[in-house]
Image (spheres, rainbow, N blue to C red):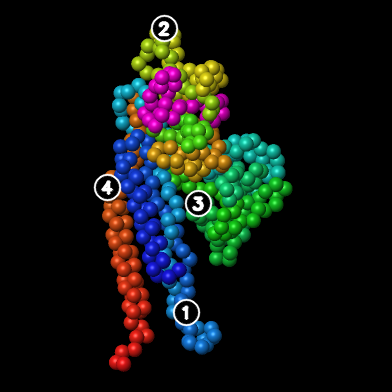
Amino acid sequence: MDGLSATGAGLVSDQRLQQVIMNNISNLGTPGFKNASGQLMAFPEQLLQRYQYGSNGAGAVPLGTVNPGVLFQETVPNFSQGLIQQTGQPLDLAIEDPLNPGVSVYALTAQGGAPGKTAAAPAMVSTLSLVVGRGGVIETAQGAPVLPVNASGAPIADARVVVNPQYKGVTLFGEAGSPVIDAKGNSSYIIVGPQGKPIPLQQGMPGAYFPVSSSQTGGVHSFFAVANVDAQGRQSVALTRDGQLHVGPNGFLYDAVSQRLLGVNAQGAPILNSAVKLNPLYQGSSYFGPNGAPLRDAAGQLSYTVVQANGAPLPTASFHTVATAVSTLQPLGGTTFLPTAQTAFVKSGAVIQTGALESSNANSTQNTIDMLSVYRNYQANQIMAQTIDSTLKLAVTQVGVVTGL
């Protein structure tokens, strides 16, 4: 990549960053909005060498390295809790996540067990305390072995994360949970599969690893489940933190962008073909309990029921928030996220506050500072591109011109 191309890549990256920041600023007043930041990826550095004309590559003199520019890689939302503000409106709901500082890990819900033995389905939990158990297996404080994941983020069945006895370092986990390598090249941990066979780790590349993330960019968080309809009319489960609900003509509850609110099953997973229907005979002032359960008025009328989309009752379903690891979600726009193939739902421990909304966690001051910084960087790249263009023009118009004839 030449200098002009690298500068152009920088201009495009700055433009994408500016779009992310402007989206944050435009959603300062959107309930449940999560501030996002743009992540850049640098192209590999290139080695510059000087060759003498006619040397056929022999006797090259290294001149140093050059960074050929950056590429806009992805947008990363910040899932920290926004301030909860009281509105007094009975259909305004705010999600109050349980305290979730530190790291988020995959852990088994079954009673330990050696690799190769049948275990229950993995559940995503947040934990601060990890211990080294029997055989060097890394466990939660409750004794559940942590579960590694593959390159796609899906849990590896019957695998264990084991401390490498040859490792002489201090820290077990690097960035995002990758293993740490000591001075002699020993990995801090190994992943053992069924029958005790090691699963190879790929350093610096996607492979089996133990996921660790902060509660801001990762971890298990709670959402309202809604029905999203794409351009082709297909429905799928979507997740939102915006609790501004309203009642449709059929008595169903919808979110701020008219996505139908969904009920959940006994395992805490959303039911796509469901709806939350208010009872028109209910005379109470509030509709939801702290755990999302319906309330009864003085006459014994329930505030709402969970029904199928055609209105038929779903007696085993309930309404509550759903919880999942946010690293498996894909931003859809606004306050909405889409689950992926790696998304697994677990029972939520969040509390629902009625008559309140969660404020956007976007900071106007920080986003304004970031916007000015990106603007100045864009100007610098623009000046550099003009300078390179002028130099090339000078070379084309004047180099090789014979004067004085």
Q: CA distance from mark 1 to mark 3?
A: 36 Å
Q: CA distance from mark 2 to mark 3?
A: 54 Å
Q: Is 265 colored magenta in this rendering?
A: yes
Horizontal side of 137 relative to 290 (left or right) equals: right
Q: Are marks 1 and 2 in contact (CB under 8 Å)?
A: no
Q: How many marks?
A: 4
Tag shown at residue 365: 4
Numbered range of the magenta stretch: 244-270
Tag shown at residue 49: 1
- Taking 28 as reference, is 182 above or below it? below
Q: Residue furthest bottom?
A: 405
Q: Quadrant of residue 384?
A: bottom left
Mark 4 vs mark 1, foreground winner is: 1
Instruction: Report which residue position mark 2 lands on.
Output: 299
Precedes in sequence: disc 4 or disc 2: 2
Q: CA distance from mark 4 to mark 1?
A: 45 Å
Q: Are marks 2 and 3 in contact (CB under 8 Å)?
A: no
* Crowd band around label 3 with a 10 angstrom C-alpha radius: few (<14), some (14–19), many (20+): some
Q: Are marks 1 and 3 in contact (CB under 8 Å)?
A: no
Q: Position of residue 150 (x, y in %)?
A: 60, 49
* Crowd band around label 2 with a 10 angstrom C-alpha radius: few (<14), some (14–19), many (20+): few
- Residue at 36% over, 49% down: 20
Precedes in sequence: disc 3 or disc 4: 3
* Crowd band around label 4 with a 10 angstrom C-alpha radius: few (<14), some (14–19), many (20+): few
